[in-house]
Amino acid sequence: NSNLQTICQKLTDIGCNVSRSYITRDDPTEISHVLNLCISSDSDWIIISGGLGPTFDDMTLSCISSTLNLPLEINDIALEMIITRYTDLVKKNIIEFFSLTDSRKKMAMLPKNSIPLKNNVGTAPGVLIKYENKNIVCLPGVPKEMESILINEVLPTIDTNKINKIKSKVLFITGITESELAPIINDFILNRNNLYIKSHPKGISNGVYHIELVISFQSNDFSDSLINSIIKDLITSIKIKTNITVDE
């Protein structure tokens, strides 16, 4: 699922915490169920990919409409985006001609008061829906289209000043197993709020264990000097209790 990986990575890069993810079939009941789960969560942003195209099984927006009781209507801005895009495709001889068919109009049928998001790669606009205290973003399923809208239209609208930003550092540990390292990490994070350490075993090379250690801090109050100080303390703690190598 490359879309999920890309979305999570881009959000994490700006300090967001991705709390959960769901994968559903093109089934209205399942989509509605998952949407309700997301609405009832504590997340401020809900990002959906896929199901914005012209075919019968592109049903994301109709499911959102019925689930949230927001009637579908032609969005003039979205329609103009679609017309402009197809006109450009004709000019570039990518398609021979363009007519505004019902299938193409379908991509401009958005839930009431939606904000269309420009698609510079494909034809179906992305969609931003503000519902109660949630921001619901709908992106195309085509990876290049999804990523373009995410980067150019969605990420700039996220107020990172309101986020308890996540900053991560990576250490590489050699000469110890994950089970041996675990109690050291557990002792270190005790009473250290907003600190999360995750180990990733990287296998055995030449008879030596290798572990990647990701140290994450979730707070706007963490300065670089404080983070570096915590990393230094962690390295010291590991070296005191073991005879291993730690590399940053």
Image: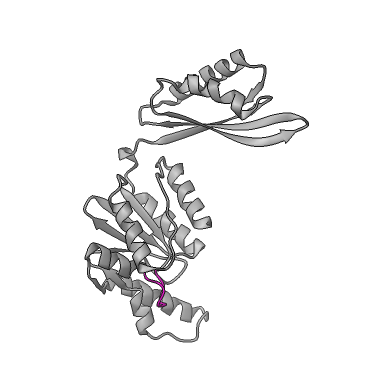
Residue 102 sits above or below residue 80 on the image: below
Image x and y of residue 24, in percent = 43, 61
- The extreme top residue here reads 240
Tag count in the figure?
A: 0
Colouring convention used in this rendered image of the protein: one colour
Image x and y of residue 230, in percent = 48, 21
Image quadrant assignment for residue 152: bottom left
Image x and y of residue 120, in percent = 44, 65
| Residue stretch rendered in magenta on the structure | 52-59
Left or right side of 100 for 112: left
Instruction: Write the residue at 67% across / 31% down.
Output: 210
Left or right side of 179 for 82: left
Instruction: Write the residue at 36% across / 31% down.
Output: 220
The residue lying toward the viewer, choosing from 244 and 140, is 244
Observer able to see residue 141? yes
Left or right side of 177 for 102: left
Residue 166 sits above or below residue 191 on the image: below
Observer able to see residue 127? no
Instruction: Write the residue at 35% across / 83% down.
Output: 102
